[in-house]
Amino acid sequence: MNIMRTLLRQSLILALFSLALMPANAKQNYDQLTREKIADSYVTMQRFAEAENEYLSILSDKSIDLLTYDRVNIKLASAMYNIRKYKEAEKRFGAVIVRNMAAYTPQFACDYVNTLIRLEKLQRAADVAKQFNGYSASHRGYQPLQNLLQGLEQYGNLPSMTTAAVNKAPFNTKGSNFWCSRFNNGILFIHNDNNEAAMLRGAELYFYDGKSSKPYAKVPRTLQTGPACIYNNGKSMIYTDNHYREDQMVRLQKDEPIVTNYLNIVELSYNEKTQQWDNAKSIFNDKPFSSICHPSVSEDGERLYFAADFTDGRGGMDIYMSRKTKKGWSEPVNMGLSVNTKNDELYPNVSGNTLTFSSNGHKGLGGMDVYSVTLNDDGLPISKTLAHLPYPINTIYNDYAYMQDEDAESGYLTSDRPNGGDLDAIYSWVKRVQFAEKDPLLEGMQVVKKSAAFIEPTEQNELIANSVAEAIAQ
């Protein structure tokens, strides 16, 4: 039994001791509700395997009522989806929808549809998406459900819309791999052996030198390291860090489990003598109860873009911008309605006057999709320049952490599309290919197909009418 589970059990014992005079059924209900809240906290931290165990323990109690059973069972199905137990998740999702459709939230509906997609039951996925199509547009989970439905309806025609050279990068290491950036004549990327929690813990920086991928141990690491951004001629780095210890991730306050681990962005300086990154400084110390991650700095080092769940946001994670000042980084500015939605916006990447990011709140093909927006001289988005990148950059799966090289003709993205083995993997993309090209870091990738990855869509392709072609060509 790990440290955190031991602490949780000890807290529960103390709480239950104080209830010694309660009737037996009251104690039982109290214990069940507390365990459910603890399991919910595990989900918040993306510790889905531990959440699964807690939910299963609750369901093993044969005395629980049917409504409680369905409520917990659908949470269990969602946790199983997130740890890729798709067949088991499908059974539980299916059982609840037949008996108690009211137990579904838009998030659970999306998880069910995505489960069916993973099992290659695309027609069934489309039917379920249509079944849930009555959710109010004001609900923050509505747009992702709509995207899945529209993506599934058009998916069979997508390959004829536009073509591109997209290949799985050879430096992917066994496990989950996501986000990358060119650095020191190589590629810096994130790798995680703990496949169930790639976003919150276990991730670390790896470096690919053109021959092999190895841990990049020059950056201090706790529960998580990365994504990162290196600027100032390689002398400065801002990276994502989860700095809370394992035993601090959950605590009980008045019998309520409170999640206390948050992501933060930390600035480092490169020490030429030790050849290590040190002098770590947390950038936004005045926001201790928010998750801040995915930094990207403009070429002049004057503007910092990142994702955060600040209280002034529109909902979920939003994209913010901060300016470099003599005293450090300024108070963050929300990027506004042109970028942020009631859902999640993540992985901003600034290149010249173009900002790309991933979102499940704008119209797209399903899951997280990549979008671009043109920036004005102040680094803020220009109205009505939002563009949805076409297939095969975006798919019905999760596509994110997009970056492009200086020539804007090639780059990388992360996706959990099936040919990555259902895990997050990094892909290289080439915008236009006129002949076979060789990247010294990607010797295993042979590009021989002529293509135009960002051709203008036809009028019938309303889903991707905002083609990225014009935005990138500027």
Image (cartoon, rainbow, N blue to C red):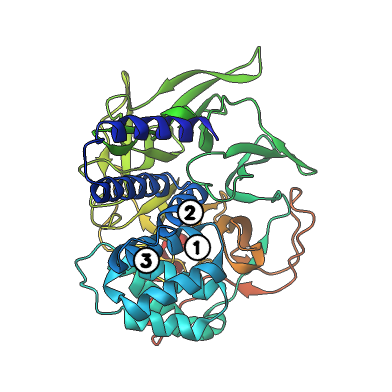
Give residue 388's position: percent from left, percent from top: 41, 67
Give the label on residue 81, or none. 1
Drawn side of residue 243 relative to residue 139, left or right: right
Residue at 62%, 51% in the rendered image: 176
Q: Nearer the viewer, residue 130 or 314?
A: 130
Q: What element carries label 2?
A: helix
Give residue 231's position: percent from left, percent from top: 51, 32
Q: Look at discs 1 and 2 and give the one toward the viewer.
A: 2
* N-term mark: 2 or 3: 2
Give residue 395's position: percent from left, percent from top: 51, 70
Can residue 253 be seen in this snapshot? yes
Q: Does residue 288 lie above or below 411 as drawn?
A: above
Instruction: Name the residue tied to disc 2.
Output: 52
Can residue 379 be seen in this snapshot? no
> Where's the N terminus, which quadrant?
top right
Residue 208 quadrant: top right
Disc 3 marks a residue whose amino acid type is: Phe
Drawn side of residue 283 relative to residue 384, left or right: right
Give the label on residue 108, or none. 3
Residue 341 quadrant: bottom left
Q: Look at discs 2 and 3 and give the one toward the viewer.
A: 2
Asked whether the beta carbons under mark 1 and mark 3 sit within 8 Å of each other, the answer is no
Disc 2 marks a residue whose amino acid type is: Glu
Give residue 338's position: percent from left, percent from top: 27, 57
